[in-house]
Amino acid sequence: MSRAALDAREALPLSAATFHILLALAGGERHGYGVIKEVEAQTGGTVKLGPGTLYRLIKQLQTDGWISEVAGDDDDDERRRYYRLTPRGRRIAQAEAQRLENLVRVARARRLLPSPASA
């Protein structure tokens, strides 16, 4: 296993809110409100990030080097900040997705979830 993969796995497990932010940014650059709306859309409205939670985590994710601020194309509001995943952030999100996939596999083996063929 590569050193980068090992480093990514050391960051796990992620909080649900952190993983949702990384998932939203995996789809492309977004501003804060765009992240909030994307998380709501991805979860069918079951997860709603408040601004306090979002911006606290964005600050931490920037400090950790998982996301970076980028120039936006929004002419309407120059205060709006856009963010994107860094390569490290993408590796960490991938490692968390793999961890969760492994848990789902165990849940299926223990018949807590239907297998994909019978679903």
Image (spheres, rainbow, N blue to C red):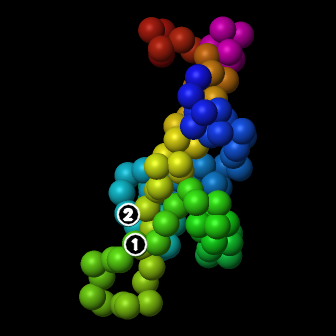
Q: Is residue 31 above or below residue 117?
A: below
Q: The disc labelled 2 sits on which kind of residue?
A: Glu
Residue identified by numbered label 1: 70
Q: Is residue 45 above or below residue 113?
A: below
Residue found at the far front of this picture: 3
Q: Which sits in the foreground, 19 or 91?
A: 91
Q: Quadrant of residue 52?
A: bottom right
Quick check: marks 1 and 2 in contact, CB under 8 Å? yes
Is 90 on the left-hand or right-hand side of 7? left
Residue identified by numbered label 2: 29
Determine the residue positioned at 68% across, 15% down.
106
Q: The disc labelled 1 sits on which kind of residue?
A: Val
Determine the residue positioned at 46% across, 72% down.
69
Question: Between marks 1 and 2, how big is the CA–CA gap?
Answer: 8 Å
**Residue 57 falls within the magenta-colored stretch:** no
Crowding around mark 2 (Cα neighbors within 10 Å: few <14, some 14 to 19, many 20+) is many
Observer able to see residue 79 = yes
Q: Quadrant of residue 79?
A: bottom left
Numbered range of the magenta stretch: 106-113
Q: Which sits in the foreground, 19 or 3?
A: 3
Q: Which sits in the foreground, 80 or 33?
A: 80
Q: Is residue 102 above or below residue 77?
A: above
Is 62 on the left-hand or right-hand side of 112? left
Observer able to see residue 23 = no
Q: Position of residue 71 (x, y in %)?
A: 35, 77
Determine the residue positioned at 48% across, 14% down.
116
Q: Position of residue 8 (x, y in %)?
A: 62, 40
Crowding around mark 1 (Cα neighbors within 10 Å: few <14, some 14 to 19, many 20+) is few
Determine the residue positioned at 61% across, 16% down.
105
Q: Position of residue 3 (x, y in %)?
A: 60, 33
Is 91 on the left-hand or right-hand side of 27? right
